Image (tube, helix red, strand yellow):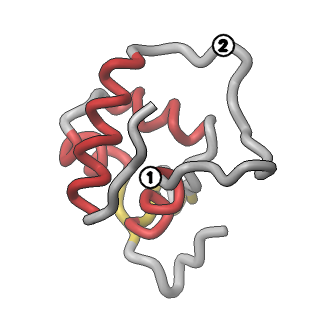
Amino acid sequence: MMDVTTEHLVKLADVARQLRVHRTTVHRWSKCGLEVVRLGNTPYTSREALARFSQPVEPGQPVRLQKNPPGNHAETERAMSRLSKSLGISLPRP
């Protein structure tokens, strides 16, 4: 769970701009497990939440996914690659 007192908050719009994806892609991630808080009318996540979201799932760990996630999966793959590089982590290739 995101701790807004210790984590580095980032507006979802800024995440989309930095990762060069459409803002709806980042909002879709929030429905698939990216932790988001709303301060006023502005949705935020954190760098730490992005790192947790981009980590591979351990066997036996529950996964929250939409039944049929909408959107461009190639765009999501490219964005996750850029995210892992910007955070200095490596993700396994599917």
> In x, y percent, where is residue 76?
37, 28
Q: Amino acid at mark 2?
A: Asn
For disc 2, the neighbor class at 10 Å (few under 14, some 14 to 19, many from 20) is few
Q: CA distance from mark 1 to mark 2?
A: 27 Å
Secondary structure at badge 1 equals: strand
Q: Quadrant of residue 67?
A: top right
Q: How many marks?
A: 2
Residue on which disc 2 sits: 68
- Quadrant holding the N terminus: bottom right
Residue on which disc 1 sits: 42
Q: Is residue 34 above or below residue 72?
A: below
Eye-nearest disc, 1 or 2: 2
Of callouts 1 and 2, the N-terminal one? 1
Q: Is residue 61 above or below residue 30?
A: below
Q: Nearer the viewer, residue 18 or 42?
A: 18
Q: Amino acid at mark 1?
A: Thr
For disc 1, the neighbor class at 10 Å (few under 14, some 14 to 19, many from 20) is few
**Which residue is rendered at x = 51% and y = 59% of the image?**
40
Does residue 75 appear to the left or right of 44 in the view shown?
Answer: left
**Which residue is rendered at x = 20% and y = 42% of the image?**
17
Does residue 47 appear to the left or right of 21 in the view shown?
Answer: right
Q: Is residue 73 above or below residue 60?
A: above
Q: Nearer the viewer, residue 19 or 91?
A: 91
